[in-house]
Image: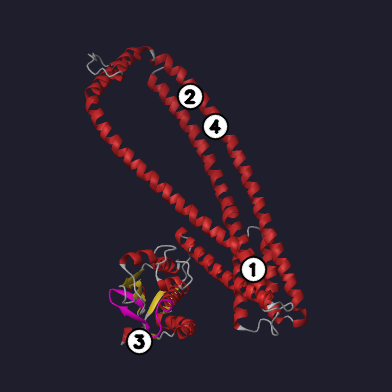
Amino acid sequence: MAIRFKILLGCLGFIVLTIAFGAFVSTQEQQLGTLATDVYDNALVAMTYAQTTQTDFVRLAEAERRTPKPFSTPAARAQLDLVLQDLDVAVSQAISAKGKRAAERVRGEIVTLPKTPPAQLAARLDTVDADLGKLVRRFHADSFVYRVKVDKIVEGTRSWFIVAIVAAGLLALMITVLLGQAIVPPINHAVSIASSIAEGKLDNQIASAGRSETARLLQALKTMQDSIVESVRRAEALRRAETARVTAEYESEIAHQASRAKSEFLATMSHELRTPLNAILGFSEVIQHQMFGPVSAQYAGYAKDIHVSGMHLLDLINDVLDLSKLEAGKVDMKEETVSLGDLVEECATLVRDQAILAGVPLTLDIDATLLVVADRRHVKQVVLNLLSNALKFTPRERGVSVRTRVHTVVELEIADGGIGMTADEIKIALSPFGQVDSKIARQHKGTGLGLPISRNLMQLHGGDLRLESEPGRGTHAIAVFPLERVVVMEDKATG
């Protein structure tokens, strides 16, 4: 039997085995992907939002127990809507029918709370709280069941993989024996020449007469010997270049993995810290306002300090969570048509008390007809961050102004009359946790995350956030939108 025919048979055997094993692995991979999505994505999201729902509901319930008319204020109704929104996410991500039904039942109980008579409200709140706890445990149990299914499929795949490896080994052994009997003796001579070349002897006299396979092999060795000197020179140059490339790729991958691990760690820790922190804030407020009986003025003062510090820590955790989500690329965009004039007016109303207390005039020069396609919540967060910074660092009697400009881009500029910054200080201010070390900056608590978060949010819109500043001349914070996000109003377009 010819050597080529034997090799062909061996290749066909390997191809058949590879196709069969590949089809099996593909099927198992699809099952594993579906189950892994249920277990590690949907189940985790469902549990997280169920826990968040319970935490927010406990805080809401504590507040409404002390209210003469529960759920009568806009803030209470808004908080109740937020609880229902989180629960809706948990329902949509539930991985079992029982979990969905349980979540929908709890949702029905929450929806009817505002209509509950005050005399029955306390009992209903306790019932809903208990049902939310059962729901969290239900979602945890569902994820465990699906993890068991994943483990079974992984174990089955491992067994078949071992069988395939053994079969491939036996086939390889058989082909090796057959080919060895046919081709080993003729190539012994070629081996001796190849050994000489391998030892560095590059002046071998190689006779390659004839048209046999061995003759063609000897001719190839001769050609190799003729080119090996040049190859050595080129190989050394390529080795150095490849080493540099591989090193750069490895360092880049390590940096990427470290950044991703950091973002995931910060997100996880932020979620885990919020639950005990909310309890601390709630209990400190109870002590501060002496809800369960009088306490000494000293203890009330301590409780106030605890509450203020806790709120500062909660702001820090929320900022860290926002930044980690942005860096991990897990921020969703809900775009809509937004009036920049209305949004700035709304933000100005929210910071008006801060401006009055600081003695800083706030002026607005906004085009009321300017509409952009953007995520309203994200843009509002950017404007509030910039306004808060401007008011914080502007001395009394100096003003803060807000205006819009449209040319090649849309610019929303917030200018303050503060102490200003150098170019190096601007780089620090735009970096995560970066805080410029100035006398005014040290008088205010901050996380150093407001500007980096705002810049990332603007970049999500295809724009940017830049700072223009000089020492002693204040700072201009400019949020930039690309021109294609502008919506031309109908009356302007027709006029």
Tell me if mark 4 has few (under 14), some (14-19) or many (20+) residues whose alpha carbon lies within 10 angstroms of its own: some
Q: Which residue is mark 4?
A: 164
Residue 187 at what x, y percent from top left?
34, 15
Q: CA distance from mark 1 to mark 4?
A: 58 Å
Amino acid marked by disc 4: Ala
The residue beneath circle 2 is 172
Spatial separation of the CA atoms under disc 2 and disc 4: 12 Å
Which marked residue is nearer to the observer: mark 1 or mark 2?
1
Residue in view at x 22 percent, y 16 percent: 203
Task: Quadrant for residue 200, please give it.
Answer: top left
Q: Secondary structure at mark 3?
A: helix
Q: Type of residue at label 2?
A: Ala
Label 1 is placed on what type of residue? Ile
Look at the picture and state if 180 lies above or below 300: above
Mark 3 residue type: Asp
According to the picture, the residue beneath numbered tag 3 turns out to be: 491
Does residue 12 show up? yes
Distance of label 1 from label 2 (alpha carbons): 67 Å
**Residue 491 at x, y percent in the picture:** 35, 86
Q: Residues in magenta? A: 391-415
Quarter of the figure that contains the C terminus: bottom left
